[in-house]
Image (cartoon, rainbow, N blue to C red):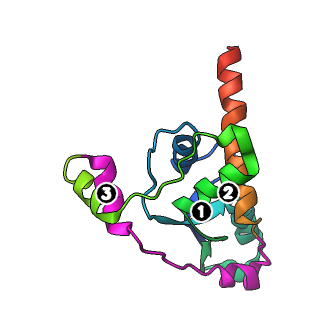
Amino acid sequence: MELAVINPVGIFGPDCSVYVEVVERLLNGKLPAIPRVTFGVVDVRDVADLHVRAMVEPGAAGERFLAAAGVMSLPEIANLLRVRLGPAARRAPTRTASDWAIRLGGLVSPRFATVVPDLGVARQASSAKAREVLGWRPRPIEETILDTAAGLAWACSATQRE
């Protein structure tokens, strides 16, 4: 049996993972200030594409591939949403929370505690191997984030119709 492993970073995109909640919380104003956290970003559709490429490419057998389009900080994501979505992102926070405030919050809140180790850390990830061996080309991060927001808007309107 042959195996190729795909290791994605934070998966965003329409109708996707826990990272959709990040965009949703920014859009609905649930975060009064943004922690200085940076995510690796990849689109769920690009992860699916990479899986297919790894299944059909003989050179992928026995290899591991990192699925990453790049990195983006939470303040950058909030700014992108405000700039590109206008009124739809009017509740997205503009303030960045200080690291000490997040650390203090981490003492009482499990949600805060999970981001404390990542404050101010920007881990870079390279998908060069997937690009070179499999010809994989992920879509731009900005498109992924905006499609995540559009997917939320569609899901919300569909839920309201039911």
Asked whether, in this view, residue 118 is left or right of residue 20, the answer is left
Alpha carbon of mark 1 to alpha carbon of mark 3: how far? 18 Å
Q: Which residue is mark 1?
A: 76
Q: Which residue is mark 3?
A: 102
| Amino acid type at mark 1 | Glu
Magenta-span inclusion, residue 130: yes
Q: Are marks 2 and 1 in contact (CB under 8 Å)?
A: yes
Please count the marks in the image.
Answer: 3
Residue at the limit of the structure toward the left, as seen here: 107
Q: Residues within 10 Å of mark 1 (few under 14, many from 20)?
A: some
Q: In percent of the image, x 75 and y 68: which residue is there? A: 138
Q: Pinpoint residue 148: horizontal percent, then vertical percent.
A: 67, 47
Q: Earlier in the sequence, mark 2 or mark 3?
A: 2
Q: Which residue is mark 2?
A: 80
Q: Pinpoint residue 110: horizontal percent, then vertical percent.
A: 27, 48
Front residue of this view, candidates 78 and 131: 78
Q: In percent of the image, x 75 and y 66: which residue is there? A: 140
Magenta-span inclusion, residue 162: no
Residue stretch in magenta: 109-137
Alpha carbon of mark 2 to alpha carbon of mark 1: how far? 6 Å
Figure quadrant of the N terminus: bottom right
Let me know if residue 44 appears in the view.
no
Residue at the limit of the structure toward the front, as seen here: 95
| Amino acid type at mark 3 | Ile
Front residue of this view, candidates 82 and 141: 82
